[in-house]
Amino acid sequence: MLELSNKQIIVLGLGGRGQAAAALLCRLGAKVLAIDSGDSETLRNAAKELRASGIQAELGVSVLPNNAFDLAVVSPAVPMNSTLVRALVEKKIPVIGELELGWRLSRCLAIGISGTNGKGTTAELVEQMLLNNDRQTVLAGHGGRPVCSVVEQTRDLDFLILQVNAFQLEATEFFRPNVAVLLNATPDHLDRYSSQDEYLSAYGKLFQNQQAFDWTIIQTEALAKLKQLKLVPSSKTITFSATDQTADLYLDRGLIISRLANWEGPLLDTDQCQLRGPHNAENLMAALAVGHALRLSLDNMVATLKAQPHGAHRFEFVAEIDGVQFIDDSKATNPEALNHALLAARAGESGKPNVWLIAGGRDKGAEFHSLGPLLSKRVKGAFLIGEAREKIRSAWSLFTPCTLAGSLLEAVTVAAKSAAPGDVVLLSPACSSFDQFQNYQERGEKFCQIVKSISWGEPPASPNMSD
């Protein structure tokens, strides 16, 4: 266990995870300096709360303070190649992330769930399966509560479920989940990583410290990519895939089938689940594999998975108005997630395109051209918003009509007027939300508000408000 009493520790980044790390360190007796290069109203409020707890907090910091620190804890929003982190490394100050800190201080077994897409859905599936099998568990990590905010609870838990992204894995050292799940590894965050290989290498840290008796549950396509980088799990491994029928768990005409020893045969009919689409079939496979590793009751797992609804902003049905479905998939922040959404949307009459797509936002360095063939089959027209709209139009205009919209309100309103019975208006941005919104949740909530104003016959809010 880390010895923290009277240690001089610096925390970089005062977002929610940085705040949680600073507060935990303070409770454990450390002398904490929390800094952030920004200086917004939100950060000033956070700094005020930390100071009230006896933590020194400074904003607008661009140069590392000349203190003798014993440890540095970095929020995942702070890149490991940033000026401040490089300065820490040059001074030979140990640098770890909030995930690593919280995991080291936890007192129960850990399940780590990672990948480009599907982390939240799969983590929630595993959480519900454990709870329905009378296991005490808490879900924390990326997209949820900070790991450091639940450390004290872990003494009473059987498992801590950790939803982790590549940014969090970058700053790990000894992190070792007893069960590690890698759902997929497709291009993303190329605005932060110099190459796809560098991004993929971060995922290798999910299982690099595992022992032979731990478990790795991994999509076969992701495993093949990591093998090319010589990143191979040394633990017991279960593979799964919706497209590769040589995997341990695979999909055959809607059935999830196992070829694992003493667990052979059909496990789950995905047509009986609320979660639809091949990508969700893989999320269900991964959850089943976790349950198998933990020796949960298959009957209880199946009942749980059949009942699990879509999470908020994850291909979430909002309304059907005059035969037109409105779907909120704001969580889709990369092209691969958009690909999944288009495949999951209801089909048009005689297979004709029937989707009015709303996409765009802040570009993360993604390439959009590969979606072209699917767009031509599924999308009647695309309404593009945000900073990346011109880049997306240049990639998609040969495949589907593209219209630039000044706001989300404008895009939804025009899409609704264009749609006919049997069509789908789909918000699936393939970009982050940070150019116009605080996060993907706010973007999705705004979409839902606009749709409900159409449904209730009320005039939409002025385009000049939050858009």
Image: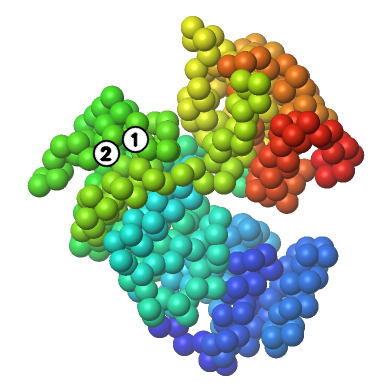
In x, y percent, where is residue 319? 62, 33
Which quarter of the figure has residue 112? bottom left
Indicate whether 52 appears above or below 39: below
Question: Residue at 77% across / 67% down in the picture?
Answer: 43
In x, y percent, where is residue 264? 13, 40
Question: Residue at 35% across / 46% down in the picture?
Answer: 305
Secondary structure at badge 2 equals strand
Q: Is residue 40 left or right of residue 219?
A: right
The front one of 327 and 48 is 327
The residue to which callout 2 is attached is 268
In x, y percent, where is residue 459? 84, 33
Q: Is residue 174 left or right of residue 316?
A: left
Question: Residue at 73% across / 41% down in the picture?
Answer: 449
Q: Quadrant of the C terminus?
A: top right
The residue to which callout 1 is attached is 272
In x, y percent, where is residue 34? 69, 76
